[in-house]
Image: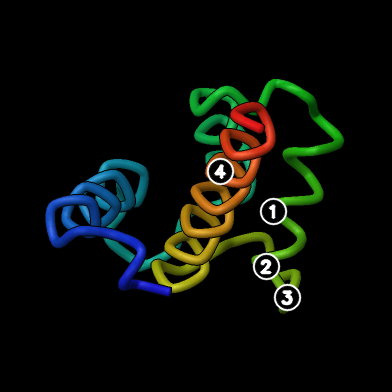
Amino acid sequence: MANLLTDEEIGEIKEAFSLFNKDGDGCITNNVLRTVTRSLGQNRRRQSCRMINEVNANSNGTINFHQFFNLIIVRKMKDTEEELKEAF
């Protein structure tokens, strides 16, 4: 999946995660993630919750970088799919 992104995009994802991981414990809370998804244009609460639940398989109320990265990849793939549908 990572080959869908450039090195620069991967760096941006790492930087974004670091901004939200304020205490440096390697995890961000679901509440913070909801804020992130809203800032990315995911204003529909149900859709945001579903995305969070998809990546937070252990349901511990936090996600780590790997889970955050997967969330971004899934979002990027959905955006690409929607763009293709609109184009044709």
CA separation, marks 3 and 4? Answer: 15 Å
Q: Residue furthest right?
A: 46
- Nearer the observer, 21 or 66: 66
Instruction: Report x, y in % for residue 63.
Output: 54, 64
The tag earlier along the polypeptide, 3 or 4, is 4
- Nearer the observer, 64 or 76: 76
Q: Which mark is residue 56?
A: 2
Asked which secondary structure carries label 3, the reply is loop
Question: Callout 4, which amino acid?
Answer: Leu
Q: Which residue is mark 1?
A: 52
Asked which secondary structure carries label 2, the reply is loop
At a point 86% along the width and 35% down the height, the residue shown is: 46
- Nearer the observer, 22 or 80: 80
Cβ atoms at labels 1 and 2 below 8 Å apart: yes
At a point 56% along the width and 30% down the height, the residue shown is: 35
Instruction: Report x, y in % for residue 78.
Output: 62, 47
The tag earlier along the polypeptide, 4 or 1, is 4
Q: Which residue is mark 4?
A: 33
Question: Callout 1, which amino acid?
Answer: Ile
Cβ atoms at labels 4 and 1 below 8 Å apart: yes
Question: Callout 3, which amino acid?
Answer: Ala
